[in-house]
Structure formats: structure tokens, C-alpha cells
């Protein structure tokens, strides 16, 4: 229960710190949510975005369709999986 001596700055600082922690956690979760590229020969050969879009822009029976807008740097979020297929 608030008292008359309670300083509104304290509440602001608490909310600010919680907001910063939440923003950092969301950024970390965002970059870890993207699935890794399967470790197949096609993915190991090229790391250019044009090669990714060639297969994943429309998709086919082997490659899934990209479920988001083309953001440019595919390898920024989608790393290469460690196990090979």
C-alpha cells in the first residue's frame, strides 16, 4: 500500500529495469528461435542469400517455403546445424 512518503521515481526505476531485462530476453529469444540450416552439401557450399532464396522463396518438395519476409542476411539468424545428414 503506497504511503505519502513513497517516491514515484522508485517505481519508475523498477519499471525501467524490468523493461530493460524484458527487452534483452526478447532479443536473445528472437535470435535463438530461428531453425538451423540442415548440414547438407547445398547449405555448406554457399552462404549467400541469393542461394537461400533460390530454393526457399517458393519452396518445393525438398525445401520448405520461407515463412517470413526476406530480411536480407539469412545466416544472421539461421546458422548451420552441427550434425551432417
Image (cartoon, rainbow, N blue to C red):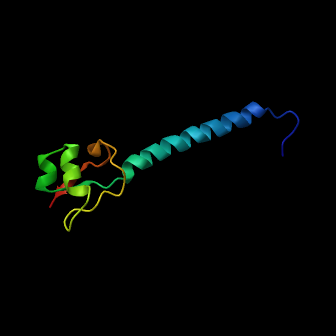
Q: Is residue 10 left or right of residue 28?
A: right
Residue 50, how many percent across, how many down?
20, 45
The vertical placement of 43 against 7, above or below, is below
- Quadrant position of residue 28: top left
Q: Residue at x 67, y 38 (%)?
A: 14
Residue 19, how many percent across, how many down?
59, 40
The vertical placement of 18 against 40, above or below, is above
Residue 59, how many percent across, how many down?
24, 61
Residue 34, how many percent across, how many down?
35, 53
Q: Is residue 83 left or right of residue 72?
A: left
Q: Residue at x 87, y 39 (%)?
A: 3
- Quadrant position of residue 83: bottom left
Q: Residue at x 31, y 55 (%)?
A: 35
- The front one of 42 and 26 is 42
Q: Residue furthest front?
A: 58
Q: Residue furthest right?
A: 4
Amino acid at each position: 500500500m503506497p504511503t505519502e512518503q513513497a517516491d514515484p521515481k522508485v517505481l519508475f526505476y523498477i519499471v525501467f529495469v524490468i523493461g530493460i531485462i524484458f527487452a534483452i530476453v526478447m532479443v536473445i529469444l528472437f535470435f535463438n528461435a530461428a531453425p538451423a540450416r540442415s548440414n547438407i552439401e547445398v547449405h555448406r557450399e554457399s552462404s549467400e542469400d541469393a542461394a537461400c532464396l533460390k530454393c526457399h522463396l517458393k519452396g518445393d518438395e525438398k525445401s520448405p517455403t520461407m515463412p517470413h519476409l526476406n530480411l536480407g542476411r539469412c545466416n544472421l539468424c539461421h546458422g548451420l546445424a552441427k550434425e551432417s545428414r
